[in-house]
Image (cartoon, rainbow, N blue to C red):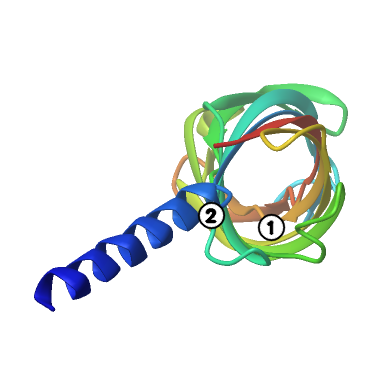
Amino acid sequence: MNIKYLAIALAAAGFISSSASAQESPWLIRARVVNIDTANKSDPIAGTSIGKDQIHVSDKTIPELDITYFFTPHWAAELILTYPQEHNVTVAGSKFGTFKHLPPVLTAQYHFSPESKISPYVGAGINYTRIFSVNLNGGTQLDQSSIGGALQAGVDYKIDKNWSLNLDVKKVQIRSDVKNAAGTKISEVRLDPWLIGAGVGYRF
């Protein structure tokens, strides 16, 4: 009798293992090309005649890697990564210097039709932007970091069970106080970029 029950248990374990291995992997990795389109909103610069929205940070096209983990077929979390990016800064049309930033973004996503060939999704989350290597005229400084929200919408087009094409749009909140060399706030800049990307994904 014990041997009979053991055989049934082993058969059941084998079936569960086979079913689990047949399921789609929860891991998805994408590589995208992303255009950073900054909003370039800023306050007037205190103590000068320079008015609002005169601080401009250059747009840029960058490579991006994101890692997505599916908790269920519909719900997932995505971490968006890149390497430090350098931007040019102009004030009232004149070159003012450069700075670098690293803006990882983490979002929670809902995928509307994960079993379909065309699978749209939306997401919301947070970004932590590290600002460094600030080289602006007159010793002007920026905050070292920015924490803000992020909204996301996109669509995957499945080529086969592993490969897919992707279009993705994000709105990310990135803001910083602008300070003079003495550390006094003289303005605020709101980059708040649109991140518009296209790429390819691989589901393990």
User: Percent position (x, y) of residue 126?
Assistant: 58, 62
User: Percent position (x, y) of residue 45?
Assistant: 73, 50
Residue under the image location 52 percent in, 27 percent down? 84
The one nearer the camera, 98 or 165, is 165
Q: Is residue 32 above or below residue 111?
A: above
Which quarter of the image is occupied by the C terminus? top right
- Residue 52 in view: no
Give amino acid for label 1. Answer: Gln
Give amino acid for label 2. Answer: Ser
- Asked if labels 2 and 1 touch by Cβ distance under 8 angstroms, the answer is yes
Report whether 110 appears left or right of 155. left
Q: Is residue 153 above or below residue 163?
A: below
Residue under the image location 52 percent in, 36 percent down? 102
Residue under the image location 85 percent in, 42 percent down? 54
Which quarter of the image is occupied by the N terminus? bottom left
Residue under the image location 75 percent in, 58 percent down? 114
User: Percent position (x, y) of residue 111?
Assistant: 75, 63
Q: Is residue 149 above or below residue 117?
A: below
Report whether 103 appears left or right of 47. left
Disc 1 secondary structure class: loop
Q: Residue furthest left?
A: 2
Disc 2 secondary structure class: strand
Q: How far is disc 1 from disc 2 in space, using C-alphas? A: 8 Å
Report whether 22 appears left or right of 48. left
Residue of label 1: 173
The one nearer the camera, 67 or 180, is 67
- Residue 201 in view: yes
The one nearer the camera, 14 or 172, is 14
Residue of label 2: 146
